[in-house]
Amino acid sequence: MRFFLILIALVFVSLFLFVGFDGWRGRSIAKRASVIRIGDGKRDVERTLGKPSSTFSLSFFTAWETWGYGSTIDWQHLFTSPIKFRVVIEYDVGGKVSRVKIPQPNEL
């Protein structure tokens, strides 16, 4: 019985630490992304935020590219748009930042 109580306590503590770390990580990425400006290059962004969680590009007609940082799963929209990013960086044809999107906490 004592073993199960300790196991349950460890599970709750681990869950609490995971949720706290995930929240801190999201705020950290958003804070670092706030210094990125329109016109910055990909190297500047990578120095500031590191490697992106995901990249998207469409090079058939245009050469724009989008980098996403800090992905989370949106359980309410699991079958339509399940992945949300804490920071989204869009690049123009020349590889310069054209848009920085940092959602508000209530938008995640």
Image (spheres, helix red, strand yellow):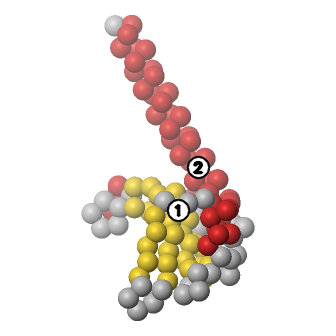
Residue 107 shows in this picture? no
Quadrant in which residue 79 is drawn: bottom left
Camera-side residue: 10 or 41? 41
Q: Which residue is mark 1?
A: 52
Residue 67 in sight here = yes
Give the camera-side residue of 64 and 38.
64
Identify the residue at horizontal 59%, vertical 67% (top origin): 102
Say the numbered circle drawn on residue 25. Answer: 2
Mark 1: amino acid: Pro
Q: Given contact means CB atoms under 8 Å apart, are the residues at marks 1 and 2 in contact?
A: no
Quarter assignment of residue 105: bottom right
- Relative height, residue 75 to residue 90 (above, below): above
Residue 10, percent across and down? 45, 22
Look at the image and tell me in which quarter the N terminus lies: top left
**Nearer to us: label 1 or label 2:** 1
- The outermost residue toward the top is 2
**Residue 57, picture quadrant:** bottom left
Q: Nearer the viewer, residue 88 or 43?
A: 43
Residue extending farthest to the right is: 35
**Viewer-proximal residue, 89 or 47?**
47
Counting residues from the N terminus, which is met first, the one under dot 1 or under dot 2? 2
Q: Residue at x 48, y 30 (%)?
A: 14
Q: Secondary structure at mark 2?
A: helix
Residue 17: x %, y % from top left:
53, 34
- Where residue 31 appears, as percent x and y from the top left, is 68, 59
**Residue at 62 percent of width and 64 percent of height:** 46
Q: Which mark is residue 16?
A: none
- Separation (CA) of disc 1 from disc 2: 14 Å
Looking at the image, is 48 positioned above or below residue 28?
below
